[in-house]
C-alpha cells in the first residue's frame, strides 16, 4: 500500500502526562512521529495536538484506533483527506552585513517572510509556508551562513 | 467534619463495593494501613510479595467478574507489581492497583523508595493516575474503577503521595463524581449483524471460535443459544476455555499451537469462521497467511483495535459480546440459521478428524502428567476452579480438564507469567471459600511465587497445589528437543528440593507420588485433606505436549507424536 504523509489532529485533556501517553502510543507500536505541535484551545482544559506521520492507510487507521483507546483523548481526526495545505514556520538568525543583506532580503521577500529583529551585524528572519518552500528558503539562506534556527512542525485545520 | 485522605480513599472503596484487598504495607501507605485498622467491612490479605498481591487480585477478578484490588507501598512495592499488571493487561482483567508515593514535595528528588510508577506502567495499564490534590483523590479512585471495568477491561493504577493521604478535606467538599471524556461513539451494529446472518446462512462449513471476551462480557448463555441456531462446532482460545461446555458434542477443544488436531483442521477447512471476543493471538493463528484460508471471517469484539489487527474481517461487529450475540439471536428469531441437513457433511468430516487423532498419551511405568489431570478431573467431577502456572502444565490442564463452566479456568494467557497460578488460586479461594481450588503447576514455575503458600496457610485458604514435577523447564526443553537438537541448555532443574518438606515448613500438608498406581490415592487424599496441600507428582521427565504446531507453520502442519496411532 502507498506510504504517504498523514496529519492527525488530537483533542486531549490538558494534563501533564498526555503528551507522554501519545508519544508512548506511537513508540510502543513502532509508529514514527515526523512532527508534532501542541497548543491549548479556547477551553483551557483541552489541548489540540497535531502530529504528522508516515504510513500506509492501514497503519494510519491502527494509529487512530490506538489513540482512541487513551482515556484522556477526546477526539482523533485524520486531516489528510481534507486536503487543506500544511504550513510550518521557521525562525533563522544569521549575519546581515551590507554585502549579503540584499541577497537575504530577496529570499525573504520571495517567500513572504520578514525580518523581526536586527542587531549589530545580524538579523532574525521569520518565514512561514509549506514544507517545500521552507526547504528551499532554508537551502538558499544556508549558503549565506545561518547561525541558528528553529523550525516548527506542520499545522493545518 | 473533616476527613483525611486515607478516610476518603476508604469511602471511595466502600462506594465501589470493595470488601477484599490484597496488599503489603510500607512507609508511604502507613497512614492508609493505620486507617484500615479502624475500618470495618474490608478484609485485607497480607501477601508475601507484591507480585502475589496483583496476581491474587487478578485471580479474584477472573473468578468473580468483579474488579480486583491491590494495595502496595511506593518504590520497590510498586515495581514488584509490574509483572502482575502487565499480566492483567494482556488478558484484559479489571484490577485496580493502589500504590503509595513519596510526599508531593519530594517527587522528582530521588527520595527514599521513590519511583515514577505511572511512567513505568503507562504501557501496561489501561490508564493510570498520579493523584495531585486531596480534592482529586475520591474522584480518581472512582474513575479508576470505572475505567478498569468498562469497555475492554484492564488494570488501572492510582499512585497516591503520602501527604495526600494525610491531608484533610471538609466532608462537603469531597467529590466522588466520575468526570472523564466521553468514549468515542460507536456505529449501530444492526447492519453488520444482518450481514453476518446472511454469511452464516450461505455457509456450509462454519466454525465458531470464542475467547475471553465471552467470559469478561458474561455472554455464556447467549453463546449457547447462538451455537444452537448455527449448528456449528465450537473452538476456543486458551482464554475462552469454559465459555462453552467442554463435554458438549459440538466442542472441538482448544485452537492453536497446542490445540486439538480436529480444532486446527476444522478452522483450516472452514468456509466461515465466527470469531467472538478474540484478538487472534499468534499462539492461535500461527502462520497468519495460512490461517483459515478458505473462510469468510466474522469478527465480534468490543475493542476496535482488535479488528483487522492480525486477521482481516469480512464482517466486523464492534460490540460487547453479549449485546452482539443477543442481537444475532434476536435476528435468528428462535429458528435455526443452518439446518442439520445443511451442515451434516461438515459435522461428519469433523467426527472423522476427532476419531483419527484424539487427544491422548501412552502409559508407561512412570507417571504421565496427562493422567494426573485426567484423574483430577474425575475426582473433582469437573467442578473445581483450576488455576495454572505456565508451560507444559498449563497446556495439559487446558487439554485434559474438560471445562464445562465459565470462570473455572484461570490461567495467564497473553503474558505467559510463570508464578501466576498459586497467588491466582489464593484470589479465587478468597472469592469462593467453599469450592475446590487447584493450582496445576510445574516444578519450575511453582518456585516463582512459592512464598504465597505462607499467605494461603495464614488465612486458612485450602488451596490444593498439584505439581507435575519433571525436573525440567518442560516447555522450553520440549522446544530444545524438537528444534534445537536436544541441547538442553539450562532447562534441567536438578530437583533437589523436597516439596513435601517444603509444604510442611510452610505449615501445609505435603504429599508425593512417584508411581502411576499412587496417583489416584495421593490426589484423593490431597483433595480430602482440609487446609493447604501441595502434591508432588514425579512424572515422566521428557513427556511432550501434543499436538504441536511448529512456530510460524500453518495450523494444519502439526507434530502429532504418537497420537495418530492411538486411534488405530
Image (cartoon, grey):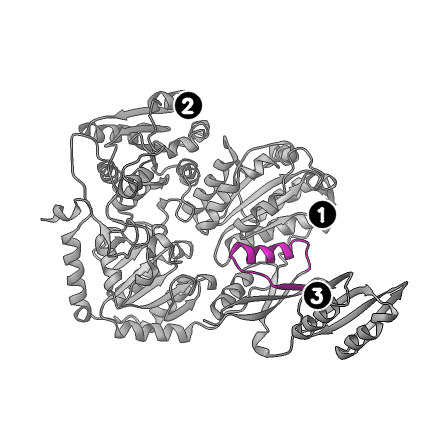
Q: Residue at x 58, y 54 (%)?
A: A24
Q: Secondary structure at mark 3?
A: loop
Furthest toward the front, the residue is A99
Look at the picture and state if A135 lies above or below B56. Answer: below
Q: Chain of mark 2?
A: B
Q: Position of residue B295 (x, y in %)?
A: 29, 68
Q: Quadrant of residue B555?
A: bottom left
State which mark lies toward you, 3 or 2.
Answer: 3
Residue at mark 3 to residue at mark 1: CA–CA distance: 35 Å
Q: Position of residue B540 (x, y in %)?
A: 23, 32
Look at the picture and state if A149 lies above or below B110. Answer: below
Q: Chain of mark 3?
A: A
Evaluate whether label 3 is on the same chain as label 2. no
Evaluate whether label 2 is on the same chain as label 1. yes
Query: Residue under circle 1?
Result: B133
Look at the picture and state if B442 lies above or below A119. Answer: above
Amino acid at each position: 500500500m502507498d506510504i504517504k504523509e498523514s496529519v492527525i489532529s488530537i483533542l486531549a485533556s490538558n494534563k501533564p502526562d498526555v503528551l507522554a501517553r501519545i508519544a508512548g502510543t506511537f513508540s510502543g507500536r513502532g509508529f514514527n512521529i515526523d512532527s508534532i505541535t501542541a497548543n491549548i484551545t479556547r477551553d483551557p482544559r483541552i489541548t489540540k495536538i497535531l502530529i504528522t506521520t508516515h504510513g500506509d492507510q492501514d497503519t494510519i487507521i491502527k494509529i487512530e484506533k490506538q489513540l482512541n483507546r487513551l482515556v484522556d483523548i477526546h477526539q482523533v481526526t485524520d486531516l489528510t483527506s481534507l486536503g487543506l495545505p500544511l504550513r510550518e514556520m521557521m525562525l533563522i538568525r544569521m549575519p546581515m552585513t551590507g554585502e549579503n543583506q540584499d541577497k537575504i532580503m530577496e529570499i525573504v521577500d520571495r517567500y513572504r517572510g520578514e525580518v523581526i529583529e536586527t542587531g549589530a551585524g545580524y538579523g532574525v528572519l521569520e518565514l512561514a509556508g509549506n514544507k517545500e518552500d521552507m526547504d528551499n528558503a532554508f537551502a538558499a539562506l544556508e549558503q549565506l551562513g545561518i547561525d541558528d534556527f528553529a523550525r516548527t512542525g506542520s499545522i493545518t485545520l | 467534619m473533616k476527613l483525611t485522605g486515607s478516610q476518603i480513599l476508604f469511602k471511595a472503596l466502600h462506594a465501589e463495593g470493595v470488601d477484599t484487598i490484597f496488599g503489603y504495607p510500607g512507609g508511604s501507605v502507613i497512614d492508609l494501613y493505620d486507617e484500615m485498622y479502624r475500618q470495618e467491612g474490608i478484609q485485607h490479605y497480607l501477601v508475601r510479595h507484591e507480585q502475589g498481591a496483583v496476581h491474587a487480585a487478578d485471580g479474584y477478578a477472573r473468578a468473580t467478574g468483579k474488579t480486583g484490588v491491590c494495595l502496595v507501598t511506593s518504590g520497590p512495592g510498586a515495581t514488584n507489581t509490574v509483572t502482575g499488571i502487565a499480566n492483567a493487561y494482556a488478558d484484559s482483567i479489571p484490577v485496580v492497583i493502589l500504590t503509595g508515593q513519596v510526599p508531593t514535595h519530594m517527587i522528582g528528588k530521588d527520595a527514599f523508595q521513590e519511583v515514577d510508577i505511572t511512567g513505568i506502567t503507562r504501557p501496561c495499564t489501561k490508564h493510570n493516575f498520579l493523584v495531585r490534590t486531596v480534592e482529586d483523590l475520591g474522584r480518581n479512585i472512582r474513575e479508576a474503577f470505572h475505567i478498569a471495568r468498562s469497555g475492554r477491561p484492564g488494570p488501572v493504577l492510582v499512585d497516591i503521595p503520602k501527604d495526600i493521604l494525610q491531608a484533610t478535606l471538609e466532608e462537603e467538599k469531597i467529590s466522588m463524581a466520575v468526570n472523564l471524556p466521553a468514549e468515542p461513539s460507536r456505529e449501530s451494529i444492526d447492519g453488520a449483524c444482518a450481514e453476518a446472518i446472511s454469511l452464516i446462512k450461505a455457509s456450509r462449513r462454519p466454525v465458531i471460535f470464542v475467547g475471553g471476551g465471552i467470559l469478561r462480557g458474561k455472554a455464556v448463555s447467549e453463546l449457547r443459544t447462538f451455537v444452537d441456531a448455527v449448528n456449528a462446532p465450537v473452538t476456543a482460545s486458551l482464554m475462552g476455555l469454559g465459555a462453552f461446555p467442554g463435554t458438549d458434542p459440538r466442542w472441538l477443544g482448544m485452537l492453536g499451537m497446542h490445540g486439538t488436531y480436529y480444532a486446527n483442521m476444522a478452522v483450516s477447512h472452514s468456509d466461515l469462521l465466527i470469531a467472538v471476543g478474540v484478538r487472534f493471538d499468534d499462539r492461535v493463528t500461527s502462520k497468519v497467511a495460512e490461517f483459515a484460508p478458505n473462510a469468510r471471517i466474522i469478527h465480534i469484539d468490543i475493542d476496535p483495535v482488535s479488528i483487522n489487527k492480525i486477521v482481516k474481517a469480512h464482517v466486523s461487529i464492534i460490540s460487547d459480546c453479549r449485546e452482539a450475540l443477543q442481537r444475532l439471536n434476536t435476528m435468528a428469531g428462535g429458528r435455526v440459521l443452518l439446518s442439520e441437513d445443511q451442515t451434516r457433511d461438515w459435522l461428519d468430516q469433523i467426527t472423522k478428524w476427532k476419531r483419527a487423532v484424539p487427544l491422548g498419551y501412552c502409559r508407561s511405568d512412570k507417571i504421565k502428567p496427562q493422567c494426573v489431570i485426567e484423574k483430577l478431573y474425575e475426582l473433582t467431577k469437573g467442578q473445581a476452579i483450576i488455576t495454572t502456572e505456565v508451560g507444559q502444565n498449563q497446556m495439559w490442564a487446558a487439554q485434559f480438564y474438560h471445562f464445562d463452566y465459565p470462570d473455572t479456568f484461570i490461567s495467564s494467557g497473553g503474558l505467559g507469567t510463570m508464578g501466576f497460578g498459586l497467588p491466582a488460586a489464593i484470589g479465587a479461594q478468597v472469592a469462593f471459600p467453599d469450592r475446590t481450588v487447584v493450582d496445576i503447576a510445574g516444578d519450575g514455575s511453582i518456585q516463582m511465587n512459592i512464598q504465597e503458600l505462607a499467605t494461603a496457610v495464614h488465612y486458612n485458604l485450602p488451596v490444593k497445589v498439584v505439581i507435575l514435577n519433571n525436573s525440567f523447564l518442560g516447555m522450553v526443553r520440549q522446544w530444545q528437543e524438537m528444534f534445537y537438537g536436544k541441547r538442553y541448555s539450562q532447562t534441567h532443574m536438578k530437583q533437589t528440593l523436597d516439596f513435601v518438606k517444603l509444604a510442611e515448613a510452610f505449615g501445609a500438608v505435603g504429599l508425593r507420588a512417584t508411581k502411576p498406581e499412587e496417583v489416584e490415592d495421593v490426589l484423593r487424599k490431597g483433595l480430602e485433606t482440609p487446609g493447604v496441600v501441595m502434591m508432588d507428582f514425579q512424572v515422566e521427565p521428557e513427556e511432550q505436549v501434543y499436538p504441536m504446531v511448529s512456530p510460524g507453520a500453518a495450523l494444519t502442519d502439526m507434530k502429532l507424536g504418537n497420537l495418530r496411532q492411538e486411534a488405530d
